[in-house]
Image (cartoon, grey):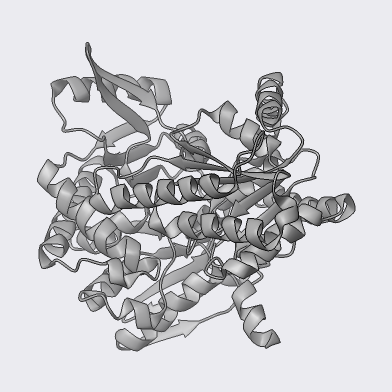
Amino acid sequence: MTNPQKRLVIVSNRLPVVIEKTDTGWNVKEGSGGLVTALAPVLRNRGGVWIGWPGAVIDSDVASLLENANKNTGYQLKPVNLSQYEIDKYYHGFANEILWPLFHDLQSRCNFDPEYWQVYQKVNQKFAEVIRNETGSDDYIWVHDYQLMTVAAELRRHIPGIKIGFFLHIPFPSLDIFLKLPWRHELLSAMLSYDLLGFQTMRDRRNFVQCVRTLIKDIVVRGKGQIISVQSRDRHIKVGHFPISIDYNHFVEKTATREVSDCAWFIHENISERQILLGIDRLDYTKGIVERLRAFEKTLIKYPELRGKASLIQIVVPSRTRIEEYKFLRSEIEEIVGNINGRFTKYGWVPVHYIFGSLDFYELLAYYKSAEIAVVTPLKDGMNLVAKEYCACSLDENGVLILSEFAGASAQLCRGAIMVNPYDVDNVADSIYKAFKMSDDEKKRRMKKMRQGIKKQDIFWWVDSFLQTAFTENLQNFPVLEHYDYISQIELSR
């Protein structure tokens, strides 16, 4: 990686720690997830900083906890203090009632409240103010995700020459969807204040460029391959696609442990002599859980020979449980599970095993290891790391991945996975049957191909490729990433 002397500053909605209030006071523990795993070593090596909301209103106790956490993490944690009103309007409002559904092509779920936009800008100003106070002119600022899309525009009003990049973890919508946003010009113009814009897939980048060309005047787009250049007035912005991934080796090593093997044995003992289909999702309407359950029900109707021989374990991780729409979604899921089990259950066999709750890491790996088939069918997803985690944990390479065409991961995994349209119940049902009947040789061939790709382009590759792009002046020196656009291939084949 170039320019190792530059200090790296990560900016995200949340800090990489979890702060909880207990009976005896506050408790802080290190967060989990691929982003923390990948970026923590880089921050430690560079003496870096992570800026974000701590998840609680900051008082003297919380501030003291963060100071102690700095010593444990090896890098600095700098909080942004947000009121409950700001969290409601900026995060629950603009970010998750407007940007989240709109960018997932579900514009009918949007609530275009003008107050949300006003508070969103003010919160982004707050983040920009903390960045100004906590960073120097030689630092590189890397901002993450849809909650903070206008931070660079706020920063450039005070520090025009600051070096700042942005990565969008969710999809970027097509022009006809993006046009629904009342503040479309303002948001696009703000995004062009970054020096480097990173997207998950080529399709997301293509959608962004189409929106910019249509809505912003005097735009010039140059280049091809993974990184292109967008000229807006006197500024040149690099725009690339960088598919995020997982710590492949960590998943492989932990899956091979005795603890995971024992847990996987117990899972299979409880569901013996049948193939396990696995769905693991955060509670969200974009994940296609309802559609997946209906497809499994259709499978049992269409292929009665699978009754008693296959069970679906559907794990739903609680999320945004205070929002009415998510409460309704949970009720709908549980009603469908009840209907399927009521219709098809027979002695010694339950078709759907439903779990609503969080798993610890070793339990998660045990479920991955136990499942013969993973059904990963979001209606739309920026990447979907469950698909990659499942493949990494298939140590014997005997698992089958059924994957939505609309997951960002489809661009990398489509040559090994069984690809489906999650809205097509018959298509998913036929694919489940195909996976159930697939030969061992074909399973190994498909899984081996996917695991090789994930191992090569892991989470550390993702960090390196983004930062290498940020610090490389000549785009011609940057390697071209092989990227297979599955949807484009479907259209070309028609």
- Horizontally, residue 341 falls left or right of residue 253, namely left
Q: Is residue 130 visible?
A: yes
Q: Quadrant of residue 249?
A: top right
Question: At x 13% / y 26%, what residue is drawn?
Answer: 59
Q: Position of residue 281 (x, y in %)?
A: 49, 47
Q: Is residue 139 visible?
A: no
Question: At x 21% / y 74%, what residue is drawn?
Answer: 183
Q: Position of residue 343 (x, y in %)?
A: 55, 49
Q: Tag count in the figure? A: 0
Determine the residue located farthest toward the right in the rendered image: 441
Question: At x 47% / y 64%, what residue is drawn?
Answer: 380
Q: Quadrant of residue 416?
A: bottom right
Q: Position of residue 124 (x, y in %)?
A: 21, 55
- Horizontally, residue 59 falls left or right of residue 218, namely left
Pick the front one: 239 or 332:
332
The quadrant the C terminus occupies is: bottom right
Pick the front one: 224 or 454:
454
Question: At x 54% / y 67%, what residue is drawn?
Answer: 406
- Horizontally, residue 65 falls left or right of residue 456, namely left
Pick the front one: 58 or 140:
58
Pick the front one: 342 or 385:
342
Q: Is residue 276 above or below residue 145?
A: above
Q: Is residue 296 above or below residue 50?
A: below
- Horizontally, residue 131 falls left or right of residue 279, namely left
Q: Position of residue 357 (x, y in %)?
A: 43, 34
